[in-house]
Amino acid sequence: MKRTFSTELAYVFGIVFVARGVVLMEKADFGVSMVVAPAYLLYRWLSPVWSFVTFGMAEYCLQAVLLLAMCLLLRFRVSYLFSFVTAVVYGFVLDAFMLLGAALPSGSVWLRVIYYALGMLFCAAGVSAMFHTYISPEVYELFVKEVSAHFGADINRFKTGYDCVSCLVGVAMRFLAFGLWHFEGVKWGTILCALINGYIIGRFSAFYEEHWTFCDRFPWRKYFAPDTATQTNAE
């Protein structure tokens, strides 16, 4: 028998898991997730000049640009603006984990491999959790969720394609900011993550749906997803 799981709690777990995973992958230094690679490169490029620029700040600034692009592609919804709020919250959580991550030991290759593997799993688990909540996710996840639904595409396959495009954008930004063949942030781990992340997210989604029924604990759905506000929740 399935247990019930709060969609609101899935939102919280999603933010925390993704932020934790990103920091672990950054600590491993095999390459950050392709989705955050553009923001990470922007952070590494600007922070030496402007010390107030943080990884989290670069994240929600770039997500604002992506949100604008999505609004131009699809019809605008007020609920989309909540995604930017999520991006800001995520940015602060990410910066907090970056401070905590600085204390993690590093050095041996095997320890870095463990960080990388755990980071990828945390990210995938977090993204999948965000797909199971009505609260507006980060703009990255919202873009995948809304655009794939608009065109009737499989969300996991669309996610893989989106990841690969993000990886290519990260490579281009790396070359522009740091010069040709200077590997900063985007490495073999980024490419591997781009290829298999969509599949791992799909496995986590299947696991969640096999063991839990996601239901609302608070009457907030109407503010985020008016079209589905009347759906019946599990008791």
Image (cartoon, rainbow, N blue to C red):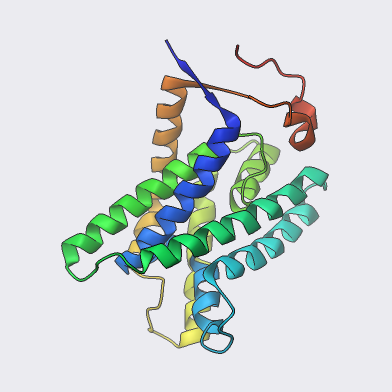
In the rendered image, the vertical position of residue 32 relative to residue 125, given as above or below: below
* Left or right, residue 193 beside residue 140: left
Q: Tell me residue 116's x, y (percent).
A: 30, 58
In the rendered image, the vertical position of residue 197 relative to residue 59, given as above or below: above
Residue 66 position by quadrant: bottom right
* Left or right, residue 25 beside residue 10: left
Residue 31 position by quadrant: bottom left
Answer whether residue 132 is visible to the viewer in this image: no
In the rendered image, the vertical position of residue 185 relative to residue 206, given as above or below: below
Residue at coordinates 54% horizontally, 45% vertically from top-left? 158
Residue 187 position by quadrant: bottom left
Q: Quadrant of the N terminus?
A: top left
Of 97 and 1, nearer the camera is 97
Q: Tell me residue 77's x, y (percent).
A: 81, 44
In the rendered image, the vertical position of residue 100 relative to residue 178, given as above or below: above
Residue at coordinates 47% horizontally, 44% vertically from top-left? 126
Answer whether residue 162 is visible to the viewer in this image: yes
Residue at coordinates 66% horizontally, 38% vertically from top-left? 135
Of 171 and 6, nearer the camera is 6
Q: Tell me residue 153's x, y (percent).
A: 60, 38
Q: In which quarter of the image is the C terminus?
A: top right
Of 214 and 51, nearer the camera is 51
Number of numbered discs on residues = 0
Residue at coordinates 70% horizontally, 55% vertically from top-left? 84
Q: Tell me residue 210's x, y (percent).
A: 42, 21
